[in-house]
Image (spheres, rainbow, N blue to C red):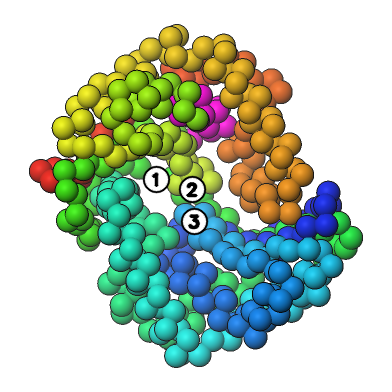
Amino acid sequence: MSVINVKSQTDLSGLHIVFRGGVQKERKGFFGVQHLCEHIFFKSLEPLLNDFDRDGISNNAYTSDNEVVVYFTGLDEYLSKYRETILEKILSFEVTEEQFNSERLVVIQEYTMYFNKQEYSHSLNLNRRLFGTFGPIGLKEDLDNLTYDDFMNYFKENFSKPHLIINVSKNSEFKTDIEFATDTFDKIYHYGQFDVALEPYTGRNGKSSIIYLSEIITEDLAYVDFICDMLGMGLQSPLYKIIRSENSLCYYVNCSLDRMTDLCGTITISSETSDANVEEFEKLTAQVLGNPEKYMTQERFDIVKQALEINLKKAEINRYSNVGKYITPIEWQVEPILESITLEKVMEIYKKYFDFNKFYKSVDTKENFI
């Protein structure tokens, strides 16, 4: 990989530094360390933070199952002053043991926060049980026991070279002679029953978290993503209209194709409702998914297709912060299929993956944990 220079359509600019692999690169004793690295990147940038605030440079990062991305956005005339310095400080990664211990405790607080929310606790525990994965949040035991020396060795092994730099600028290209990482990741997950540590949630108070997962999907990814939008995008989507608007069973319904690795993912349908509504929620979800001819109409197809086309145009205008198409594999992207996609093709793909009887069903209630 290398540097991708993108011409901005406005005076807004972005610098995005990408390290591929994400939590796929973690192993026992290091679950959660990629996320911790994301946090500690900014320790090496502390000398610049006041300047960033003064010059209106936004700076942030995220960790996913597939990558860690550190990014900076602002007016081109100001961000241009910092590009080389940012990259130098990110890759040199000078952090003291005191800074490491301080940020490790912050990450542990974030860990606790996630497991104090029922929907997150349910999802994270379910992924541990079914796939043996711990997600970006990791495992508290590993975070507690991680030493400064082990952390620094892990960083040098995994973060000394970025896989990709995306520079979005109206006025200048970015060039560097640094060495880029070239390793690739080809993991495909399979369902199992893993004997791993769970973090039980105790604050249910009569509320249930519901998660339905499809079989592992490795093909037709962009089409499946489009179908998820047909089912669950907006208040007039079939799932929202039937379950929320007409029957008042919940506040939200998520329907998405979740990217587990570059090569596989699952359709996830999830929500929260009262314990008394769980059976009716499942009945109505089965009703929607079991009647595509009724709910997956030409009108609904046309609405979603136009909405996605417009969203892509807006993303192009604000391309300084919308760089997902350079990070996400093309197989996952809807844009390449929009011109040729048809309702007939959608219905063909729908029949392959949206049989609700084949979904894994998990409800987190007081009586039933995972």
x and y percent of residue 192 in the render? Answer: 27, 44
Q: Are the residues flagged by discs 2 and 1 in contact, CB closer than 8 Å?
A: yes
Residue depth check, mark 2 versus mark 3: number of the one nearer the observer: 3
Q: Is residue 364 above or below residue 57?
A: above
User: Mark 2 highlights which residue?
Assistant: 261
Q: Is residue 221 one of those drawn in magenta?
A: yes
Q: Is residue 342 above or below residue 87?
A: above
Instruction: Give neighbour class at mark 2: few <14, some 14-19, many 20+ (Cα, 10 Å).
Output: many
x and y percent of residue 14 in the render? Answer: 73, 60
Quarter in which the C terminus is drawn: top left
Circle 3 sits in a helix, a strand or a loop, which is it? loop
Question: Residue placed at 16% from the left, 32% from the top?
Answer: 276
Q: Is residue 119 one of those drawn in magenta?
A: no
Q: Which mark is residue 189?
A: 1
Circle 2 sits in a helix, a strand or a loop, which is it? strand
The amino acid pointed to by label 2 is Thr
Q: Which residues are magenta?
A: 218-233
What distance separates the C-alpha of mark 3 from that of mark 1? 16 Å
Q: Which mark is residue 64?
A: 3
Closest to the observer: 198 or 317? Answer: 317
Circle 1 sits in a helix, a strand or a loop, which is it? loop
Quarter in which the N terminus is drawn: bottom right
Horizontally, residue 66 falls left or right of residue 30, namely right
Horizontally, residue 153 falls left or right of residue 278, namely right
| Nearer-N-terminus badge (3/1) | 3
What distance separates the C-alpha of mark 2 from that of mark 3? 10 Å
What distance separates the C-alpha of mark 2 from that of mark 1? 8 Å
Question: Residue placed at 22% from the left, 41% from the top?
Answer: 208
x and y percent of residue 188 in the render? Answer: 44, 45
